[in-house]
Amino acid sequence: MRIGINRVEARIQWPAVFLIAIGGFGLTVSSWGFLFSCIGLINGLIWSSNQSVAHQEHLAVFWSGPFLLFAVGLQHGLMMLAGQYILERRHYRAAVAGCILAVFPSFCLCLSTPVGIWALLLLSDDQVKSEFDRSDQEDPPKDVFRVLTTP
């Protein structure tokens, strides 16, 4: 029985590690971009009070920057979380959702697309699904009250 677990671990390890690495890189880039776009937006708002209406309308386009970068950062954070779930073989649906998000490239990180497809193909395998089901049944969620009150 242990041989099957090692084979599944070997198959899902690399896509999970790649998801964590690509997600971490994208999260770092989007966080810095979010920070600098917010600083630029605040700077533009301060200086636009003396400018023409056309300049103020042009500044309205820059409002989309922080929101877009926040969404991309959220995507990469969920990719990292999916990679962690795959390594732990827990939360199958969340892992699949994170892999689906990895299929959509952002920041020209086209590396996430093949890795996301690779992980989705592995997650659709019945042997891998059974490992996720088994790990969820072996470690049920702990009731905090019961843990604290048990002598």
Image (tube, rainbow, N blue to C red):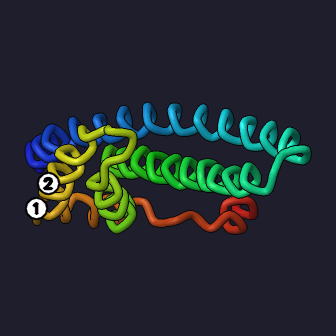
**Amino acid type at mark 1:** Asp
Q: Which of 133 and 83 is in front in this view?
A: 83
Local crowd at mark 2 within 10 Å, few (<14), some, or many (≥20)?
Answer: some
Q: How far apart are marks 2 and 1 (CA)?
A: 5 Å
Give percent across and percent down for residue 76: 44, 46
Horizontal arrangement in the rendering, residue 150 relative to residue 76 (left or right): right
Element at badge 2? helix
Give percent across and percent down for residue 117: 17, 53
Q: Which of 117 and 123 is in front in this view?
A: 117
Q: In this view, does 28 lie above or below 2?
A: above
Q: Residue at x 15, y 38 (%)?
A: 10
- Can residue 89 be spotted in the picture? no
Count of numbered badges drawn on the protein: 2
Image quadrant holding the C terminus, namely bottom right
Horizontal arrangement in the rendering, residue 101 relative to residue 3 (left or right): right
Q: Which of 8 and 64 is in front in this view?
A: 64
Report the residue marked by disc 1.
Answer: 125
- Quadrant of residue 112 within the rendered picture: top left
Element at badge 1? loop
Give percent across and percent down for residue 17: 30, 35
Local crowd at mark 1 within 10 Å, few (<14), some, or many (≥20)?
Answer: few
Q: Which residue is drawn at 25% across and 41% down?
A: 110
Report the residue marked by disc 2.
Answer: 122
Q: Which residue is drawn at 12% across and 57% down?
A: 121
**Amino acid type at mark 2:** Leu
- Can residue 98 be spotted in the picture? yes
